[in-house]
Image (cartoon, rainbow, N blue to C red):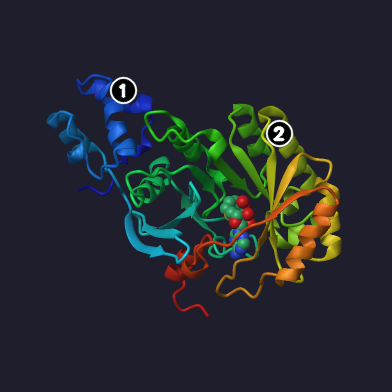
Amino acid sequence: MSTSLPLITDLSRAELAEWCTARGHQAYRADQIRRWIYGKRVNAFEEMHDVPAALREQMQQEFQFYSATVTRHQVSRDGTEKLLLQLQDGEYTECVMMREDDRRTVCISSQVGCAMGCVFCASGLLGVKRNLSTGEILEQILRLDRLLPETERITNVVLMGMGEPLANLKNLLPALTTLNEKGALGIGARRITISTVGLPDKIRELARLGIQYNLAISLHAATDALRTEIVPVNKSIGVQEIMAAADDYFEQTGRRVTYEYCLLGSVNDSDQNARDLAQLLAHRNAHINLIPMNPVQSLELHAPTQPRSTQFADILRERGVNVTIRKRKGADIDAACGQLRLKEELPLAP
Ligand code: SAH
């Protein structure tokens, strides 16, 4: 198989219908093909039994079904599963599936690496290599979906893997449309969460679409001085600008914005830091998710003690902020974003 063929999942429903008709087939074949891919969990064109052989052959000639290779599959004691995928150009991407009651949440990547450079994050240590294509974004979902028993479906999707999703909206939005469409995966926008470092123009662009995606903003500090230390790109953006864009998102979509705050021991976990955060969020319809830092090899930053995290949450709660501390999942399999790829790229790092 040639390595330069596009992925079948790079095509939207309309594009696939057009492709079918251009080759003398009826447009409805596109829906049939998509049902096989997204609903019936096949792994190759030849498995699409009610699609005419000639059409299957043409797809085989012009598209790839998958482009990545699963190079690692790790299963955690808590049921979390993580895949390391090697892409066609040799780069790596990671994705995770978490199980909680009836929910099957997948966490996927949008880029290879990340340009944002948050000081506690494994994904940004090597910078950004490139955007993932629409098909590569969807392939993560398909690969994880195939791990589930027949009776279970992916219920939620979070863009909290590697990369900055809003820096790759061009390829991400068509992938989300496919997730959303009935006849593809039918995962509602309210069950899709886009997590961002906070790019105001892109948040506004997303707000204008008026789709009910959940927006999560990775804040990590309430003041510009501290935030710029932790999230270097903040220098040219600023907390107030992000909050204004987030307020705009809430107004236009009616979706309450979530703020993520990675707790870093002795960096952003003081009582004063909590009070500053409460002041910023108390009068907003917001939810804050505290994430005690997951350890990253080669970084000395670490999570606060558990009592410190609890105290931090209590200060927010006392001031009327809606707060939760995120449960850790898959710690025994390096499930936090960027960790597996880092091991693959820097196998000798301390
Ligand atoms: N670039 C986007 C999405 C990917 S990161 C963003 O910044 O939101 C997804 C979330 O994981 C972010 O909130 C990020 O701050 C957090 N994260 C990254 N590394 C982490 C670590 N070592 N421990 C805890 N949270 C981490």
| Disc 2 residue crowd, few under 14, some 14–19, many 20+, Cα 10 Å | many
Which mark is drawn over residue 18? 1
Which comes sooner in the sequence, label 1 or label 2?
Answer: 1
Q: Residue 212 location, x and y as percent?
A: 59, 32
* Residue to which mark 2 is pinned: 250
Q: Residue 307 location, x and y as percent?
A: 75, 70
Residue type at mark 1: give it.
Glu
Q: Nearer the viewer, residue 340 or 191?
A: 191
Q: Is residue 294 left or right of residue 8?
A: right
Residue type at mark 2: give it.
Phe
Determine if residue 223 is in view. no
Q: Nearer the viewer, residue 45 or 191?
A: 191
Q: CA distance from mark 1 to mark 2?
A: 37 Å
Q: Residue furthest front?
A: 101
Q: Nearer the viewer, residue 308 or 269?
A: 308
Q: How many tags in the picture?
A: 2
Q: Residue at x 51, y 33 (%)?
A: 188
